[in-house]
Amino acid sequence: MNSGFQMDTDINRRLTLNQTKQAALYALQNYDVDWSLIHFIQVSEHVTFRIQSSEGESYLLRIHTRNKSYAEVISELEWLAHLRSKGLIVPDGVLNRNGEFITVATTDGNAEYYATLMRWIEGDRLDKKVLTEDNIRAMGKLMADLHGASVDFVPSNTFTRTTWGRESFNRDWVHLQQHHNHFITEEAFQLYTEASAKVADQIHTFTPHAQNYGIIHADLHNGNIVFCDDRPFAIDFGRCGFGYHIYDIAQAVMGLRPHQRKLFIEGYVKVRQLSENTISMLECFFIMAIIEAYSFHAENELETEGLIEEQSYAQSILRAYINGEPLLFQTFDE
């Protein structure tokens, strides 16, 4: 798996940022927004900029990777509209002067990108070191509310989003096999191979139904949650798609400390029940999420040093999973 943007070297990073900044300036000309400031945020599923208008309003401008189709981008906005209809506060798309949610933005080199402008969700991101117990329980409740909203969602005939499951995991596993040697030794990679096989076998035994499967955020870690007056709001739905709710939880708690994961689940179950085999499924998807993350970053030489430093911790978790030992709420050396 990769982001679709060439960010693996300093040269490619500069080229990508130059092109997407050009695309951002072009896109802004197509909106009735009297903007006064544009601020680069980051490169992830898309390149993002914060736009501030002379009237004091803020917007999020997204330049989408060219491997995302028009149908995928507009389908994300369809899902966000459904969430708003359920009373959830999520990013809201802004129409351009042609009455469309998607703008085709070009660069000096005639590269084309899809661009979307969203209303800014006010709030602060909180590092896991400063999250209170109530904050984390509220995050779990937020995810449960999102899952509850998916139960009666009826997508349009053209709705197109990724399915996160066996096939997506297999693609990421193949990619990691090809590029793991940047930060994982061949001996250590045997752990990944065993863990991957176990994940694939387990997923095959899961049965989707309306209460455990639907449209999920798929990336609701604490960096994609903002707090305003101690209330959490979900942002960055660029990875949303079909999948198990437990997979969504695994993605969310992967970056939390073991005791914080318990609090997250406590908040979740105050809103929605979980099945008896939740822990087994959660461990499976937790390992799946780890392998996906390393696959995503495998080719980026700018992150190699950090990935190498994480290996002792990651391999301890993989070893516990292979041996059938508890791993979600245990502390491993980092």
Image (cartoon, rainbow, N blue to C red):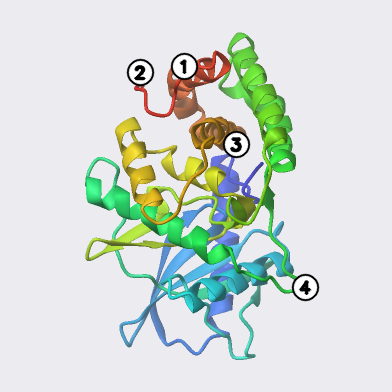
| Quarter of the rendering occupied by the N terminus | top right
Which circle, 1 or 4, is nearer the viewer? Answer: 4
Instruction: Residue type at mark 3: give it.
Output: Glu
Query: Which one is earlier in the sequence, the residue at label 1 or at label 3?
Result: 3
The answer for how far apart the CA atoms under marks 2 and 1 are is 8 Å
Q: Specify the quadrant of the image occupied by residue 326.
A: top left
Pointers 1 and 3 in contact (C-beta within 8 Å): no
- Which callout, 2 or 4, points at the residue further toward the start of the chain? 4
Q: Which mark is residue 292?
A: 3
Secondary-structure class at tag 1: helix
The residue positioned 55% from the left and 13% from the top of the image is 323
- Point out residue 306 in the picture as x, y percentages from the top left corner: 44, 28
How far is mark 1 from mark 3, CA to CA? 17 Å
Q: Pointer 2 and pointer 1: residues touching (CB < 8 Å)?
A: yes
Q: Mark number for residue 316?
A: 1
Report crowding for label 4: few under 14, some 14 to 19, many 20 or more residues within 10 A (C-alpha): few
> Residue at position x 57%, y 39% from top?
9
Q: Residues within 10 Å of mark 1 (few under 14, many from 20)?
A: some
The amino acid on which the numbered mark 2 sits, given as a three-letter code, is Asp
Instruction: Tell me the distance, in whole angstroms, between the alpha carbons under discs 1 and 4.
Output: 45 Å
Along the polypeptide, which appears first: circle 1 or circle 4?
A: 4
Q: Secondary structure at mark 2?
A: loop
On screen, residue 186 above or below 87: above
Seen as rendered, the residue at the extreme top is 187
Dot 1 amino acid type: Ser
For badge 4, the amino acid type reads Asn
Pick whichever of labels 2 and 1 is earlier in the sequence: 1
Q: Which residue is mark 2?
A: 333
Q: List the residue tagged with mark 4.
A: 157
